[in-house]
Amino acid sequence: METKIIKGNEALAEGAVRGGCRFYAGYPITPQSEILEWMSWRQKEVGGVFVQGESEIASVNMVFAARALGARAMTSSSGPGFSLKQEGIAYWVSAGVPAVVACVQRFGIGDGYISAGQDNYWQAVKGGGNGDYHLITLAPNSVQECLDMAYESFELAEKWMHPVLILSDGTIGQMMEPCTMPVMKEYDMDQPWAAKGTAIGEGENKVITDITYFQDIDEWNAGYIEKMRKIQKDEQRWEEFNIDDADVILVAYGISSRVAQRSVEIARKKGIKLGLIRPITLWPYPRKAFEKINKNCKGIVTLEMNMMGQMLEDVKIAVSCKFPCYALATAQKVAPTDEVIAFCQKVMDGKVKETEVF
Amino acid sequence: MLNEIVCAGLGGQGVLTAGKIMMHVALEKGLHTTWFPSYGNEMRGGAANCNVMISDNKVASPYADHPDVLFAMAERAVDTYMKTMKKGSIIIANSTIIPKDKEYRDDITVIKVPATELAQKFGNERSANIVLLGAMVKHTCIFSKEDFEKYMCSYFESQGKGKRNEQNIKAFEIGYNYI
Amino acid sequence: MSNRSKKAPKIMKCENKFCAGCGHSLFDRILGEVLTEMNIIGETIVCSDIGCNHMFQYSMAVDVIVPPHGKMGAALTAQKRVRPDKYAITIAGDGGAYAIGLAETVAAATRNENVTMFVMNNTLYAMTGGQAAPTTQLGQISASTPKGRTEKDHGLDFDVFNVMRNLDIAYLARTSVANPSEIRKTKNAVKKAIEKQRDNKGFSLVEVLVPCPTNWGLKPVDAMKRIENELMVRYEMGEIIDK
């Protein structure tokens, strides 16, 4: 298999293409535009469709239609553009359309900032649009994972007939690393569930919409909630480093997890026992990972590129508040390793007040 | 072995390309590597830098918190990064642009090479980054000269710019042989 | 009467759910007949708007997708590009196509996407209870213009001909369902618009003036008279683009 040095965003686009994506619609926004630009020539090469939509709203709804007709289809955005897509994504959920969206997080509220951030966490994993739902949310922390997750995303979405979100960030998206390319997957868009036209006498015509219009709502709700609970149980993924004997455990995803891992490496060399839990799925949140924490652990610290420590509440739920929990939330920059280690040292020494959840 | 390298200067000086070449050579040598850019809103003329990590092992953080090497094309690069550099680290300074009397930390080795001037004399000011790469390869022990030349050429070939490789080798050697 | 009426084609699978005198049911029947006569039901995927118009799904046996309200211009674009051998058609409302979805409608037209839009203009938002739409006429009373629409308070109304007449599209027409002659014209326009798509000519839009007796506060017959006496006078009727 060939190895190429590419940007995270390009890897994400290429992973989707090799995973069978044959329709992409999007709108330019920094720091995700490389996905759109890559798709603009690559879809043509593989016989797929690229549309630069007139807005994020148009793009997300183009993906609804393309996916409803069977094609593996995705869109991507960042910051305010991701906000604009939320209505459309909610429609994917209610119609059971297994489409994929990527959000390359930038920092800030409203227009915000064009550089990396991790402050879309709440929006991404606590809903986003209206109604009871979570997206299956994957958080890559390397260029290779951008590719691998996009490559796998359609099968995961189709397994549950539920959308998948790849929640990247500006650093993972813009950085370059060597990346190994998997083989191109073939996909037949004439799936049994897809709308492709039904002649009279050929059977029931397809209606791809919020199913509650056509089914008993209580029955639909029961099936839906059962599915969601099953996803929650079956799809938790994480990675862990040195947690067995750790005095303090860092919890971080995406770019922050890279810095956290480096911090653990440096601290261990100095005899400071740090560990790391790195959620790979943000929904379902990998609560199982927290069951193994030793009872002598003095604290759990989330490392996040936001101001409010958005992930802290999920950590507190995962450990049922049995351990003191802290957020090292340093806005648009990940804290440097020195600062991370110093903070953890203070936690060990009991010199930091527990962080309150916003 | 983990080398934290920062390439910094102004947009248009080729600092991002210098970093990409290092990354490419590292990959060809079977090393682990990451490259992370940051730049201002301006397409040209603003600050530009990239962090390049090169290691025997998988690279965790792509951020060079404490650089081992600063590849400095402009004065601002020194002002921004010198304070966080490791003891015993090295600055490869483009002394055409960075003032001669610039003060440096005592615990850092500084290699001053007038890269822009040498490139101008050689006939292509835009090769200043390659000239400075020559100096860097000589004064650090991350790459051998032969490997670097070979894979720098294959990098440019992969970018469809192989035609200028002869010139690039010349520029590289001017920097390599300067001190 | 019964032995003179034409039998509904099989695509009209059951009774519709529209209010008595509603124009949508007339239009759906016209479309059902055209799809049947052209023998393309199995090659058609209708993109639904959201509003009264979307109730065609209950009574028509044709594949349907339902994106958010108004976003048909975008969805049709994707439909046609993903499955170019299928017909991409929408039955839209005037609020969907001209207010919340105006950007998508005009963008699909400016790109000259090979898709077909049928827009039902009943001069208001019907399903939500008769609030003003871009097509609400000056002076018209609606649930959100209780004293009548005025230029000063509500701005001027929308005419799709003014927006699209200079675009490089295949077909643009306005008809109504106010009387048998208009119904025939509507059926012709529907057929022609779909033929444009069949022949890869590009974007077509037919606006159909339809009555909403419920929200207009008129008897069905009087609602038809309003179309004849007021709307067909105010609007330019017929085909203005036919390429």
Image (cartoon, coloured by chain):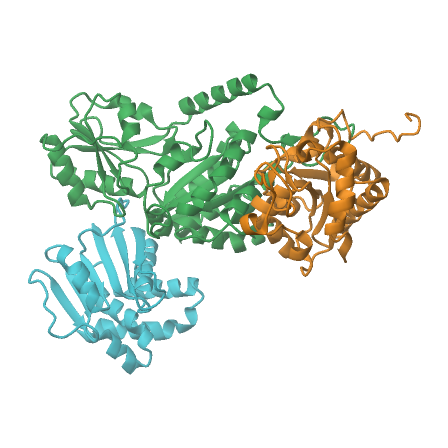
Chain colours: A green, B cyan, C orange
Above or below: residue C201 compared with residue B148: above
Residue A334 appears left or right of C114? left
Q: Is residue B75 left or right of residue C236?
A: left
Q: Position of residue C177 (x, y in %)?
A: 78, 40
Residue A121 lies in quadrant: top left
Count of numbered badges drawn on the protein: 0
Q: Does residue C101 sit above or below A235 in this rendering?
A: below
Q: Residue furthest left?
A: B106
At a point 39% along the width and 63% down the height, the residue shown is: B154
Q: Is residue C44 visible?
A: yes
Viewer-closest of B43 and A41? B43
Give the camera-side residue of C219 and A121: C219
Residue reaching furthest to the right: C3
Q: Quadrant of the C terminus of chain A?
A: top left
Q: Is residue B138 visible?
A: no
The location of residue A280, given as percent across then percent down, is 36, 34
In percent of width and height, residue B42 lies at 34, 64
Residue B51 lies, in percent from the top left, at 27, 55
The residue at the far front in this view is C147
* Quarter of the view holding residue A230: top left
User: Which residue is drawn at the image coordinates 82% and 44% (left, top)?
Assistant: C182
Q: Is residue B18 left or right of residue C77?
A: left
Describe residue A297's horizontal placement relative to residue A256 as left or right.
left
